[in-house]
Image (spheres, rainbow, N blue to C red):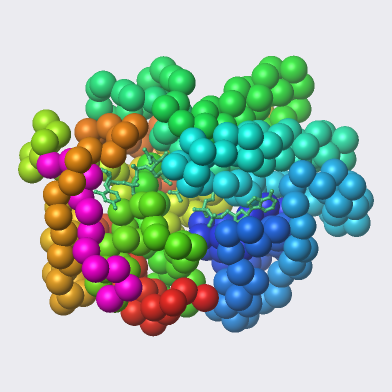
C-alpha cells in the first residue's frame, strides 16, 4: 500500500516514515524543507534498509499534487506538513493560515479529485482551548485557540468534519497530539529546531549539551504540585505507532474521528528537568520567569478512546523519553 506523507522530513514525520517503511508500506514524502533537511530522510532510509520517494515541493502546489496522485497508486495520506511556531504565528497570521489552512484545503481538493479519501491529520490538544477539567477526553468541547497556530488546527478539523458529513466515503483520523518528545532509539533522527527552541524538551537538551546557558521556567506560581506547568509528554515513537494503528482502523470505517494521543499522565517542568538530569548526568541550570502568555497550568489526556478504538496505548515512560532525547542531542549537537 502506498502512503503519501506530507511534511515527512520533519520531526514527527520522519519517525512516521521510518515506522511505515518498517511496516512494509511504500512511502512517498512531499516536503518543501522549510523547517527540515533531506538528511533526516537519508538516515530513515539507512535505518529501515529501504528506499522512499522524496519530492521537494509544497502542499499548496495543486499541479504538483495532481501529478503525484496521477503517477502513484496512493491509497492514503498522512498529513504532517505545516508551520508550528506559536509566537511566529501571532506575528505572521497570514503565513500560518495560508500554509496550514490553505495548504490543507488544496491537499484535500487534490485528494478528492483523485479519489483518495483516507487521511490521517496531525491535530493538537490545542483545539481544547483553555480547558478547566482534566483529563481531557475527545468529548470535551473544542474552543477558540489563543493564537493563529492553534486556530489553524481547529479550522482544519472543522473543514474535515464538514467534508466527512458531505461525502460519506471519507475516512479521516484527527489525531490530537499532547506533547511529543524523545527520538528514535538509534539517536540518528530527532527534533532539530531552527534557532532557539520554543518547546521545553529541546530547550532542556540544548542547555545540557552546552548550546544554551540556562532554561527559563515560565511560571512558578501555578496551582500545580510544584508551581510549574504540567503537561502530558508522549514519546514520538509511541505517537507514530498511534498513526499506524489509525491508518489500519481507517481501512474499515468511514467518517471523521478524533483520537487523543497522550499517555494520560502529566509531569511538571521541574520534574522534567530532574528526570533529564538523572538520565543524562548533566546539570540543567534554570531560572524562574514570568508565565508565558497563552499557557495553561495543566493539560493531560484521557487516552481511553484511542485504547479502545485503535487498540493503542503509549508504552514508553519518562526515562526512555529522556534517554532517547539525550542520545539524539549528544550524538548530533548541531542537529542534522
Ligand atoms: P516539523 O516542522 O518538524 O515538520 C513539519 C514539516 O512540514 C517540515 O519538514 C516542513 O518543512 C514541512 N512543511 C511545512 N510547510 C510545508 C508546505 N507548505 N509544503 C510542504 N511541506 C511543508 O514539525 P513536527 O513537530 O514534526 O510537526 C508535524 C505536524 O504535527 C505539524 O502539522 C504540527 O503542527 C503538528 N503538531 C506538532 C506538535 C509538536 O509538539 N511537535 C504538537 C501538535 C501537533
Ligand atoms: C506548545 C504550544 C502548543 C503546541 C505545542 C507543540 C503554546 C502556548 N502552546 O504547547 O500550541 O501545540 O507547543 O508545539 O506555546 N516551558 C518552560 N520553558 C521553556 C519552554 C516551555 O518553562 O523554555 C514550559 C511551558 O510553560 C509549559 C511546558 O514547559 O508549561 C511545556 O511547554 P511546550 O513544550 O512549549 O509545550 P506547550 O506549551 O504544552
Magenta stretch encompasses residue 211? yes
In this rendering, does residue 154 appear at all?
A: yes
The residue positioned farthest toward the left in the image shown: 226
Residue 143 location, x and y as percent?
A: 44, 20
Foreground residue, 50 or 321? 321
Residue at 14% over, 34% down: 222
Residue at 34% over, 32% down: 294
The image shows residue 218, relative to residue 50, as above or below, that is: above
Foreground residue, 303 or 204? 204
Residue 9 location, x and y as percent?
A: 61, 63
Q: Main secondary structure of the magenta part?
A: loop
Specify start and end residues of the magenta stretch as a single range.
210-220
Compared across the picture, whether 312 is left or right of 165 comes to: left
Foreground residue, 114 or 278? 278
The image shows residue 300, relative to residue 2, as above or below, that is: above
Foreground residue, 308 or 36? 36
Compared across the picture, whether 13 is left or right of 203 comes to: right
The image shows residue 332, relative to residue 313, as above or below, that is: below
Residue 96 location, x and y as percent?
A: 60, 39
In this rendering, does residue 310 appear at all?
A: no
Query: Residue 49's quadrant in the figure?
Result: bottom right
Magenta stretch encompasses residue 155? no
Residue at 52% over, 32% down: 148
Amino acid at each position: 500500500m502506498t502512503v503519501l506523507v506530507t511534511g515527512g522530513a520533519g520531526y514527527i514525520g520522519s519517525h512516521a516514515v521510518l515506522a511505515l517503511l518498517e511496516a512494509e508500506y511504500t512511502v512517498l514524502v512531499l516536503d518543501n524543507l522549510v523547517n527540515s533537511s533531506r538528511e533526516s530522510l537519508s538516515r530513515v532510509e539507512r535505518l529501515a534498509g529501504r528506499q522512499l520517494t522524496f519530492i521537494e515541493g509544497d502542499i499548496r502546489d495543486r499541479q504538483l499534487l495532481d501529478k503525484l496522485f496521477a503517477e502513484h497508486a496512493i491509497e492514503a495520506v498522512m498529513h504532517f506538513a505545516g508551520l508550528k511556531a506559536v509566537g511566529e504565528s501571532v506575528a505572521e497570521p497570514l503565513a500560518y493560515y495560508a500554509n496550514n489552512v490553505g495548504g490543507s484545503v488544496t491537499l484535500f481538493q487534490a485528494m478528492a479529485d483523485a479519489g483518495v479519501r483516507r487521511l490521517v491529520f496531525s491535530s493538537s490538544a490545542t483545539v481544547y482551548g483553555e480547558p478547566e477539567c482534566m483529563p481531557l477526553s475527545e468529548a470535551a468541547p473544542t474552543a477558540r485557540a489563543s493564537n493563529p497556530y492553534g486556530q489553524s488546527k481547529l479550522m482544519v478539523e472543522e473543514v474535515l468534519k464538514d467534508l466527512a458529513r458531505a461525502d460519506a466515503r471519507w475516512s479521516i483520523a484527527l489525531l490530537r497530539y499532547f506533547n511529543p518528545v524523545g527520538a528514535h532509539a538509534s539517536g540518528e533522527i530527532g527534533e532539530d529546531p531552527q534557532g532557539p527552541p520554543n518547546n521545553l524538551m529541546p530547550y532542556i537538551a540544548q542547555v545540557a549539551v552546552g548550546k544554551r546557558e540556562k532554561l527559563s521556567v515560565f511560571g512558578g506560581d501555578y496551582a500545580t504540585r510544584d508551581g510549574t506547568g504540567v503537561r502530558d509528554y508522549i514519546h514520538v515513537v509511541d505517537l507514530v505507532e498511534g498513526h499506524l494503528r489509525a491508518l489500519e482502523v481507517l481501512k474499515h470505517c468511514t467518517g471523521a474521528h478524533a483520537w487523543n494521543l497522550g499517555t494520560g499522565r502529566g509531569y511538571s517542568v521541574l520534574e522534567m528537568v530532574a528526570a533529564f538530569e538523572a538520565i543524562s548526568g548533566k546539570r540543567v541550570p534554570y531560572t524562574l520567569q514570568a508565565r508565558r502568555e497563552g499557557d495553561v497550568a495543566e493539560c493531560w489526556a484521557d487516552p481511553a478512546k484511542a485504547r479502545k478504538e485503535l487498540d493503542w496505548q503509549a508504552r514508553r515512560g519518562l526515562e526512555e523519553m529522556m534517554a532517547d532525547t539525550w542520545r539524539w542531542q549528544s550524538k548530533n549537537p548541531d542537529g542534522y
